[in-house]
Structures are given as structure tokens and as C-alpha cells.
Amino acid sequence: MLHVPVALEWRVINDTSSSFAFRGNDKCNTVNSLAFNRSMLSCRCPQGFDGNPYLLQPCQDIDECIDGTKRCWPGSKCMNIPGSFICEDGKKWIKLAVAGLGTSLGLLLLLIAAWWVHKLLKKRENIRRKKMAFKRNGGLLLERQLLSGEVNVEKIKLFSSKELEKSTDNFHVDRILGKGGQGTVYKGMLTDGRIVAVKKSTKVDEDRLSQFINEVVILSQINHRSVVKLLGCCLETEVPLLVYEFIPNGSLSQYIHEQNEDFPLTWELRLRIATEIAGALSYLHGAASIPIFHRDIKSTNILLDEKYRAKVADFGTSRSVAIDQTHLTTLVHGTFGYLDPEYFQSSQFTEKSDVYSFGVVLVELLTGQKPISFTRTQEEGRSLASHFIILMQEDRLFEVVDARVLKEGSKEDILVVANLARRCLNLNGKNRPTMREVTAELEGIQMSQKATNGEQNYEEVDIVRYDSIEPWDVASSSTGTGSGLAAGPASSSQGIALLSL
């Protein structure tokens, strides 16, 4: 049997109503059919498409990148497009990635640069502000005095604000040791491990800043065992910061008025503390290179160190005076109950005003009572000083003396101390003893007491004689009237206010 190949060629009548009219990717050509005497449509899929053009579904795109019929050159990437494909350079994607990464790094570097510039500008502004504060607070004057060679540079240090902020944990509230009218005191630790007290003033009298610097220099030269040591200051801040040695055992007032059974104030200890306070004031009034009036002696300004030795503190209202000057005319400063009535009426402060305030502290030590009490009647005297004088005049001293003092001290010694306090409280300042005389009397009572008890331990008593001051008791590198300190504002006819101490 003869086999003949047969091929069928399908054509569709070219009719606009036909459902096989041109669709999507289909490609149809018109063909004239002689057999049917009419035009026919011959359809096929375009290049790059595959499928049956006569079916309802149009021709589908061939993905040449998948079927492997097309190959791209090495290093390039095949990308399918409708009806064909393209080969893209593979490095282009790397370039795009690198470009994106570079842009990100550029933005990051720009931000870092902006932050660095901001920090630099802020640092410069801080430096400018610190320089202005340093100049405003009298820093240039202090530098001139330190460079003059007339002041012992080792005696005073200029602290940076950063150092003191770090030492006080940015002046954290937990570091506060106490607050007063002159400012707030913070406990700090320096980089060398020393514990210090940093005083931050609440206000500054700008008219007296130059005098303040001279006073800081004077106080920094004081090196007396019974005076709190001024270590230095910081002038870079809005208000000056003063740095003192840290005294750990609080104020004398706490031990007098808050009965401490763990450490009671014995008669011997009270007598020693009184002698130490008197010695410090005697030194300030006469033995220092330039006389200094404290102007705010009170039990809260007497601190006790680790061995319970007294140290005079808080020179916030102090004045230094010319050696030939006898008094200062100023606004009244001080604490009621300790304030000299003569000074209160005349506004003239003398060394005898400090003597009066010391007399009140001495009565506190004798009686254990507060300087002002509203439990006493007006006739008895609201102030302790008035009440004490009245009882002395009525020969009723031992009614007010503290029970522990009566138990431990002899009546003769108590009476001698009471009479000394009475003389200190004389309303006429000229009739009061000097602090040098007070110190000598208290030392005499101490020695008499020790002789009676058969004890000659003078080291324990810490007696300081000011007619022969030993180098381990007092050290001052500014001596005589011809020093640079005396030639400055301190030698003028007016006193110098010590600000913010």
C-alpha cells in the first residue's frame, strides 16, 4: 500500500464577526482562497512567543533565560523581555550596590562631620564662657598675684570646673553636706583620692570680686590646726567654687544640742574645744599676716575632725583689715543669738565682736542650751546670753549649767569659765578681753585641771601658745606688712568682703 504524506493547512474565514479576529500576540495574514472564492486568515505566533494561535488563549511569551535556548556571555546576566531577552552586564549590579553603599557612607560621614562640628563649636563656646567667667570672677588678678612670686603658689590651686563636677558627681543632691545663706556645700573626691568639701555660692557681689580674690589668697596662706584649710578655688563657673579640706565629724552644735550617747561631750572635751576655738580666733586677729575678723562665730560653724578637734569654718562674711585699722563699718551680718549688740546698733565691727560671739559659744558649752529659745519667758531672756547674765547676777549660775558639766567639772573651774564668758558678753566692747587673753585663761584652766588630776599629757590637750607659735601649729608664707597682699586692696581704709565662702 502506498503511503503519501498529507498536511492539513487550517485557515479561518476572514470575517469580522469571527472569534478568531486578531487577538493580543497572534499574527494573522489574509489569504485569498480560490476553492472557497473568499479571503481566509492564516495565523501564527510571533517570534519569541509559543502556542496555538487558533485557540482561545493567546500566544504565550517564551522565557529564553529559562529554557536555555539563549546564552549570554560570561559575566553578564540574562533578562527576559516580551518576545525576546537581553544580556545585561553583571558588574552593573555591583556598581549599583557600591553606589548605594557609598551614598550611605557619605551620608553617615556627613552626619558625623556635622556632629563633630557641633561638638567643636559647643566646646569653643564652653571655653569662651569659661574664660569670660574666669575674667569676671577675678581670675586675671589671681594669676598676677601667683606669678608675682609674693604668694606661695603651692598654697592655692586653681581647680577646673570639669574636675570639681567629676569629684561631686555633677553636684548630685546625694553629695550635699549642708546648705546655708552663703551657698551649698558638697562632698567630693579629687583624682588623688583626697576627700574635700566644695562650696557653691548662691550669689556673688560683682562689685567686690577683685577683693574676693585677694581674700582667697590671704585665707589660702592660713595653715592653722584649728582653722579649716582652704585648698583652692574654681573661677570658670558662673559663681566661684571654693574647695576646703573635708571635716568628717560634723558641727559642734550637733554634739551640744543633739545628745549623742555614743560620744558625749565631757567637761574635759568641752574645755579643750573652747581653747582650740579661742586659739584659732586669736591667730586670725593677730598672728596672721593680715588680721581677719570672722563675723559669724557660732557652734554650727565649728567643725570637729576625726580626732574631735575643733576647726573654725565658714568665712563667708569674713573681713580682712589693714593692720592699723581697729574696726569696719559695714552692713550688719551675723546670726541672731550670737550677734554683738554693740555691732548691731553701730554697724561697726571690731575684733571684740568676734569675742562676744565666742562668749555665746562658751555659754553653749557650759549649759548645753541653744542661743535663742522661745520656751524662756521674756523676763528670763529669750537669748541665752541675756539669760546667762541674769542668772550670773542673781548668783544662780549652777541652775543653768549642764548636768554632765556639773558632774565632771569642779565648781571652781566652772565658775572661772563662766566669769570668762560673762566678760566676753559685756555690752561694752572695750571691756571685753581680747581673744589672746581668752586663750591664755583657758589654757591656764586646762593646765590647772591636769595638774589636779596628775596628768601632764600636753599633746592630747593640743595647747597652742601664741607668744611662741610653733611651725607645726601655724604656717603662713605671707608675713609682714610689706607683702604683696598688704600692698593690695587689703591695705586700704576699707575692709574686704570675702564672697561666697
Image (cartoon, rainbow, N blue to C red):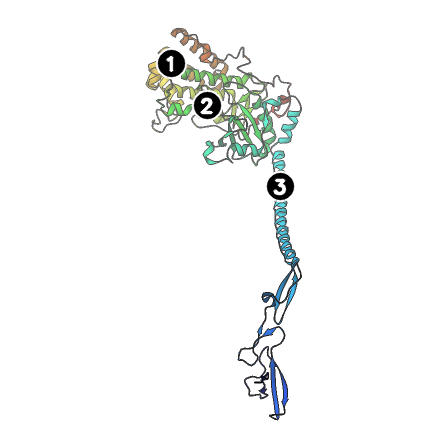
Residue 207 shows in this picture? yes
Sequence order check: which comes first, mark 2 or mark 1?
2
Q: CA distance from mark 2 to mark 1?
A: 22 Å
Q: Is residue 22 above or below residue 37?
A: above
Mark seen at residue 302:
2
Sequence order check: which comes first, mark 2 or mark 3?
3
**Crowdedness near tag 2: few (<14), some (14–19) or many (≥20) residues, C-alpha within 10 Å:** many
Q: Is residue 295 above or below residue 162?
A: above
Disc 1, SS: helix
**Crowdedness near tag 3: few (<14), some (14–19) or many (≥20) residues, C-alpha within 10 Å:** few
Where residue 490 appears, as percent x and y from the top left, is 60, 24
Sequence order check: which comes first, mark 1 or mark 3?
3
Q: Does residue 419 appear to the left or right of 280 in the view shown?
A: left
Residue 483: name its quadrant. top right
Where residue 2 appears, as percent x and y from the top left, is 58, 85
Q: Which residue is mark 3?
A: 125
Disc 3, SS: helix
Position of the N terminus, as image quadrant, is: bottom right
The residue type indicated by label 3 comes to Glu
Q: Is residue 392 above or below residue 137?
A: above
Disc 2, SS: strand
Where residue 32 appears, as percent x and y from the top left, is 64, 89
Identify the residue at horizontal 38%, vertical 15% (top origin): 267
Identify the residue at horizontal 45%, vertical 13% (top origin): 461
Where residue 13 appears, as percent x and y from the top left, is 58, 88
Q: CA distance from mark 1 to mark 3?
A: 63 Å
Residue 434 shows in this picture? no
Q: Nearer the viewer, mark 1 or mark 3?
A: 3
**Crowdedness near tag 1: few (<14), some (14–19) or many (≥20) residues, C-alpha within 10 Å:** many
Q: Which residue is mark 1?
A: 414
Residue 470: name its quadrant. top right
Question: Most extreme residue toward the bottom, as rendered?
Answer: 37
